[in-house]
């Protein structure tokens, strides 16, 4: 902790001379550590009171027939908001956990095709009333080294976003494949799309294209920040392509070194 943090910039001039500037950014680094600590502590401390509130609300709603009908709607709204807050705290805790170490919790080959099948069925039940057509094309032998739970958080965030930001009867296509460049996961939708100007900031915490619209979808604004961090830890990169009114494509690229191939004699079980 007594380390000095320096930011070094090198400028090369036309005459071949170099100028090197070193700036002491130790104070920024310490501030960043304090921020992470603070967020982790607050999220943790808020969890217990929230669990108590949600517990009482659940008990009250279990006895709905004894409740004055006037209070039923407000109580249901309170329960929904408590659930939303629980999601937010979970996402914040996950994000701080991801930020504190730079490597995944495990480096075992993960069966991505199986995982995508289960994410797809969760997405179908989430989008039941919107009647989306969700298709999946995945190589069952293509495994990815890393942490199963982190990868599941990242990929399900991308698929659930496609569901959230695609109107009824839209199409969502999930593809998992490999080539010489490595392995790739693409989640494509024909939903509302995103203006170009927003793309560079999309993976920032709490960044939303349209905050009024986003609050209706029940998102936390942390999903893509989680995706970015999970990918960084798995030496992956996120590519986003989008056209407003036409749809979006979120592609995760992984290096060949992260890829493992399942052997023929032990086929991956399908769900
Ligand atoms: P949120 O919880 O708001 O969905 P995210 O970090 O997951 O937060 O996404 C950030 C913002 O990016 C969203 O609020 C939304 O405006 C935009 N976005 C993400 N995915 C899509 C998509 N598939 N189509 C259109 N917009 C999207």
Image (tube, rainbow, N blue to C red):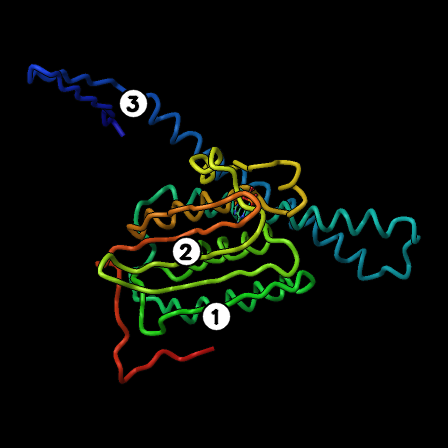
Q: Is mark 2 within 8 Å of ligand 1?
A: no
Residue beneath the point at 25% across and 18% down? 24
Of badges 2 and 3, the one in the foreground is 2
**Mark 3 lies on residue:** 26
Q: Residues within 10 Å of mark 2 (few under 14, many from 20)?
A: many
Of badges 1 and 2, the one in the foreground is 1
Of badges 3 and 1, the one in the foreground is 1
Closest to the observer, 9 or 41: 9
Closest to the observer, 104 or 44: 104
Estimate the x, y position of residue 97 in percent, counting from the top left.
41, 46
Precedes in sequence: disc 1 or disc 2:
1
Between the residue at mark 2 and the residue at mark 3, the CA separation in whole angstroms equals: 30 Å
Task: In the rendered structure, find residue 150 and report the number of the disc placed on it.
Answer: 2
Where ligand 1 lies, by quadrant? Answer: top right
Closest to the observer, 43 or 231: 231
Q: Is mark 3 within 8 Å of ligand 1?
A: no
Precedes in sequence: disc 2 or disc 3:
3
Q: Using the image, determine if residue 35 lies above or below residue 96.
A: above
Residue beneath the point at 54% across and 65% down? 134
Q: Using the image, determine if residue 130 lies above or below residue 111.
A: above
Residue beneath the point at 57% across and 46% down? 245
Between the residue at mark 3 and the residue at mark 1, the CA separation in whole angstroms equals: 46 Å
Residue beneath the point at 37% across and 53% down? 252
Q: Secondary structure at mark 3?
A: helix
Q: Secondary structure at mark 2?
A: helix
Residue 175 visible to the viewer: yes
Precedes in sequence: disc 3 or disc 1:
3
Q: Secondary structure at mark 1?
A: helix
Estimate the x, y position of residue 267 in percent, counting from the top left.
33, 81
* Callout 1 touching callout 2 (CB < 8 Å): no
**Mark 1 lies on residue:** 117
């Amino acid at each position: 902790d007594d380390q000095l943090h320096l930011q070094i910039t090198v400028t090369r001039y036309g005459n071949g001379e170099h100028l090197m500037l070193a700036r002491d950014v130790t104070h920024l680094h310490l501030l960043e550590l304090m921020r992470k600590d603070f967020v982790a502590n607050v999220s943790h401390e808020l969890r217990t009171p929230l669990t108590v509130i949600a517990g009482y609300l659940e008990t009250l709603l279990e006895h709905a027939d004894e409740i004055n009908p006037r209070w039923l709607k407000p109580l249901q709204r309170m329960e929904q908001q408590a659930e939303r807050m629980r999601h937010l705290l979970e996402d914040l805790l996950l994000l701080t956990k991801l930020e504190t170490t730079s490597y995944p919790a495990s480096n075992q080959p993960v069966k991505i095709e199986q995982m995508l099948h289960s994410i797809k069925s969760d997405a179908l039940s989430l989008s039941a009333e919107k009647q989306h057509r969700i298709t999946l094309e995945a190589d069952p032998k293509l495994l990815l080294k890393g942490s199963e739970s982190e990868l599941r958080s990242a990929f399900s965030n991308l698929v659930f976003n496609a569901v959230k930001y695609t109107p009824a009867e839209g199409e969502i296509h999930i593809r998992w494949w490999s080539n010489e460049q490595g392995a790739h996961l693409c989640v494509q939708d024909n939903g509302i799309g995103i203006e170009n100007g927003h793309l560079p900031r999309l993976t920032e915490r709490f960044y939303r294209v349209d905050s009024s619209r986003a609050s209706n979808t029940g998102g936390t604004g942390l999903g893509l920040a989680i995706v970015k961090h999970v990918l960084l830890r798995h030496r992956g990169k996120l590519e986003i392509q989008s056209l407003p009114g036409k749809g979006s494509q979120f592609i995760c690229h992984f290096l060949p070194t992260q890829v493992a191939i399942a052997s023929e004699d032990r086929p991956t079980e399908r769900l």
